[in-house]
Structures are given as C-alpha cells and as structure tokens.
Image: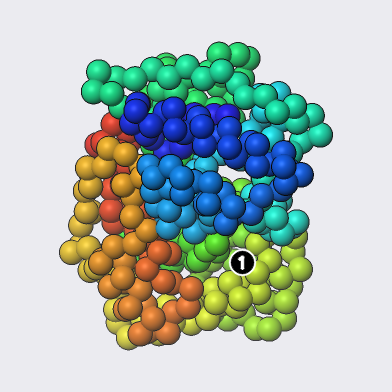
Amino acid sequence: FPFHAMTECADSTVRRYLQFLKELHAALKIRGGVISNGEIQQLASAHPVIERCFRRGVAHSGADLQGLTPGIQAIDRDVTGVRVNDTDQALEERGLAGTIRPDESMDGSLCDLEVHASQDGRVPVGLGDFRGSNHGKAGYPPRMSEPSRCQWCGTDSQYVAYHDEEWGVPVRDDVALFSKLILDTFQSGLSWLVVLRKRAAILEVMDDLNPRRLATWDTSRIEQAIVDERIIRNRAKIEAAVHNAGCFMEIEQSGLSFSDLLWSHVGGKTIVNRRTWECELPGFTPESESMARDLKSRGFKWTGPTVCYAFMQAVGMVNDHRVECFRWKACC
C-alpha cells in the first residue's frame, strides 16, 4: 500500500498506520471486498492520528475515500491486489463512491514498507520508499530526484502538471476567475482529478465557461450538454453554471469587477500560509465563508465555503503549498 496514501504522519504513528492498513485489508476480505465510508471511518477511529487526518481530508476533498487517500487513483494489483476505484469511473459512471473493491488477483498480501525518518522523528511527504518494481509508477512515491511537492498531486503526470503550473498561481482576469469557480462547483462531492480529466471536454462543450456566452444558454443547450458523455453530467451543476453566468453578468452590468469583488475577501493580495503538514489544510476559512455569503447574496449557487476555499487555493488567493514544496516561494 503506498505510504503517501496518508498525508504525512509522525514516525511514532507509522506502526499504527500499518496496523490500520492490515485491519482494513482484513475487513475487505471478510466483507467480500466491499467496504463503506462509515466502516472505513470506524476502523480509523481506533487510531486517533489517522482519524484526524481522515476527517481533515474529508473536509478538504469533499469525498470520504478520496480524503483518506488524496492523489491516489489505485493500489497496484501486483502489490496488494486491492484497487481503489478510479473516481472518474466509480463516482461518475458506476456510482461506487466511497467503496474499495478487490481485484480478481487479490491475494491478501501487503508489501514491505521502508520509511526514512528525519532526525526530528517526522516523515516528510515523499520520503516513504518502497522496495520493488513499482517505484515511480502512478500512485507511488516519486523518486528522490524529484523536487519536493505537495503530496496531494501524487505522481500522476496530469495532476503533477496542474500542481506545478496552475495551482496557487494568482488569477486576476474576470472571465478566467469565473471559469475556475465553475470548475470548482463541478468538483463538489468528487475528486479534483475527476474534473481535471474532463476539463478540456467541459470547456469545449460549455463555451469555455465564458459567462457572457453561457448566460445566453436556453433549455435546449442545457439538455444537449447533459447527454454528452465526455463531461460531468450533473444536471444541477450544469444548470447552476448557466444560472451563475447570469449572476456574473448582473455584477458586470452594475459596473463592478468580478475579480475585485472576489479578491476583496483576502484584502486584494495573496494570503501566504506556512503549512508543513497537509493534514493542517482546513476545509474552509473565515475568508471563504465571507466569499460564500457574498456570492449567495448575489444569487450564486453551489458556492459554499468549502467550494470557495478550494477555489481560493487554486487561483492564488491563498498560498497553501507546503513550505517545503518548490512551488511555495514561487506563489508567494
């Protein structure tokens, strides 16, 4: 099981983490390979540090299983035989949110784990190392030659590129901010990787999420989008995107800048945090609650405090890269 399935943990908790994995694996075998979010959380509750990271991960990602295993799409079958469903398939098409199912080759084995702890007893992100041929594959820790990154992006090339090139970079353009906000509303209840995989198609089908064009959509355009299998076909989210485009137009027609309106909730400049551990990331903040209230008062939908905080992180209103991440300084 990839060590970085956990955000980070102190060296003293590694044994508890491994015990939790064994208990989870045993529960899978007893239950025929399917386990619910509640059962996972019940297992985690016996291990306070793991439960705390689990709960914070849930608040941050909006999806229980993805909160427990940020940035991981699968557990390679030749290591444990157990696979975390690809969220793009499980959440969207097969309705298996929050389940873990075994591969046919499930053999009940756990891989050997070698952990390199620093002198202060902590195991920073990226320092979990595995013996075997899977080192460096998607879902496994990066090789030590890689720059230090936030752990949530894992080693998936698309996710890493998003982390390295987009996440936390300040955005000031009105239309670009609206587009990114709508993408975050599409993420609600899903992993960001689901949205990232489908982003190009969403932009193609939905007029680049340009509010000036989206605001002109009628029922027929909405129905046309809903049947397109390339995008996230959630009627409420698609209808909210069109509705929010109308709200954007009202702000623009009143002479206000959408960018200035949003950035005002952080005083017009990036809030630079100095986080060491990813489990320190909050699900929302007073600033995101303020933004959510403001947007709600202007008629926006699907823009609660958690969505707003994810948006603020993405567009550089807050710098939530770990201080050890090579992107932290660049986004200050």
- In the rendered image, which quarter contains the N terminus? top right
Q: Position of residue 84 (x, y in %)?
A: 65, 41
Q: Which residue is at a point 60% across and 39% down the rendered structure image?
A: 24
Residue designated by label 1: 206
Q: Amino acid at mark 1?
A: Met
Above or below 331: residue 222: below
167 with respect to 230 (left or right)? left
232 with respect to 151 (left or right)? right
Above or below 143: residue 252: below
Figure label count: 1
271 with respect to 142 (left or right)? left
71 with respect to 261 (left or right)? right
The answer to whether residue 227 is seen in the rendering is yes
Q: Residues within 10 Å of mark 1 (few under 14, many from 20)?
A: many
Secondary element type, mark 1: loop
Q: Position of residue 12 (x, y in %)?
A: 34, 28
The answer to whether residue 57 is seen in the rendering is no
Asked which quadrant contains residue 30, the reply is top right
Above or below 6: residue 318: below
Q: Which residue is at a point 37% across and 58% down the rendered structure image?
A: 283
Q: Which residue is at a point 52% across and 42% down the rendered structure image?
A: 69
Asked which quadrant contains residue 8, the reply is top left
Q: Which residue is at a point 51% across and 20% down the rendered structure image?
A: 113
Q: Position of residue 149 (x, y in %)?
A: 38, 32
- The color scheme shown is rainbow
